[in-house]
Image: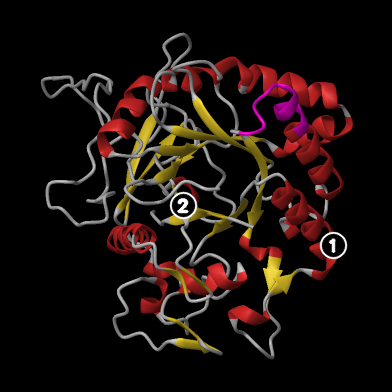
Amino acid sequence: MLSSCLGSAGVNWGTMATHQLPPNNVVKMLIVDGFDKVKFFEADEVILNALVGTDIEVMLAIPNYMLKDLSSDSLIAASWVEANVSAYAYTNGVKIRYVAVGNEPFLETYNGTYLQYILPTLKNVQESLNKAGLGTEVKATILFNAGINFSPESNQVPSAGDFRPEARDLTLQIVQYLYSNNAPFVVNIYPFLNLYGNIYFPLDFAFFDRSKVKPVRDGDHVYTNVFDANFGTLGGQQMEIKTLNIENAMRFNQGLIEHCLSEQGTPARKGKKIEVYLFSLIDENAKSIAPGNFERHWGMFEFDGKPKYELDLSGRMQKDKGLVAVEGVNYMQKKDCDFDDLAVVTDGDPSDDKCRFPVMIAVAVGHSLVVLLHKKLLCILVAAILVLMDV
């Protein structure tokens, strides 16, 4: 039902940046580096055109704000499918495989805003795909957040997990619909955010190399990393925020790739293939930092397309298989002026009447560079994943 992880890796490609890299250049980088699956948070015509003729599999997403309209009118859903899926479903077009309905619409912070729209939209989109003759190869699904489930305080083990009481009935209906359509169950798992303030969480349990790890026993199942535990319950403990750095991001992502490609599955799902999309591809400097400054620095690549660390997507740790940067990136010309000792240092804005000076201030903060441009902040680094499970 799902393609094997063997020899492949997926990635989330977000576009919330003030200066986006040319899509054609990014697509070339994806091919060279070996990414053969990509997920978007909405359909972008320019990016989809850049993917035409490639073998990269695509997951599109419908933003939450569109759910109300698509749930109430099947014609709107059909129009969306025609414009964003059917338009690319031709020989050597774009290999669209999934359409995600919403992005974590079950989040508790939404206070149930989208709950009534989720299942009707899912049905309208899948039925539109079916009518377009694409339902066999393109599946509609939901992007769940890991917090959709919980484990009771008295029994914090994966097997005791269940869906949240207020969303349980709806979630089960969705799972049944996904199963009937041979569609995947999709969940975002961030192995450190839910309880990132937990100073007692064992750091090594967040990774896959089993160093200094005290295993968690759940009946006959033994868990040696938080990913498998999360996968078993779609929840679990997370890692502390101060441990987020480039070294740990590389350690986690490399370990995840090797774990997935091993096809060992998890203690509760031995031998089951896991399809993952790493989060994320490139830093996005226009994302909200309300959850934390790290939101703008999830990328494996810097804003300009340079890799932050080595990563072997083959899972075989080959020394010559590191990530390749995006090529053809244009930079603003570096400018300097020689005032021959006539320059004056001033604390005030030198602008006067029609002679205006745009001001930019660069301030070094710790190991990060914070740039203030007309009071706009460009502010770390973490790594996460999106997981698809068969149901």
- Picture residue at 25% right of the left edge, 21% below the top: 328
Q: Is residue 238 above or below residue 126?
A: below
Residue 181 sits in quarter: top right
How far from the left and from the top, in percent, is residue 363? Answer: 34, 45
- Of the residues shown, which amino acid type is indicated by label 2? Val
Left or right of residue 212: residue 60: right
Apparent side of residue 209 relative to residue 322 in the rendered image (left or right): right
State the residue position of label 1.
Answer: 169
Left or right of 7 in this view: 104: right
- The residue singled out by tag 2 in the image is 276
Instruction: Look at 59% across and 55% down and name the residue there.
Output: 390
Q: Is residue 43 above or below residue 35?
A: above
Q: Which residues are magenta?
A: 127-136
Does 352 appear in magenta? Answer: no
Could one spot residue 36 in this view of the protein? Answer: yes
Residue type marked 1: Asp
**Callout 1: SS:** helix
Q: Percent position (x, y) of residue 118?
A: 79, 45
Dot 1 crowding, Cα within 10 Å, few <14, some 14–19, many 20+: few
The spot of residue 231 in percent (x, y) is 54, 67
The label on residue 232 is none
Q: Residue lying farthest top?
A: 354
In this view, 331 is above or below 63: above
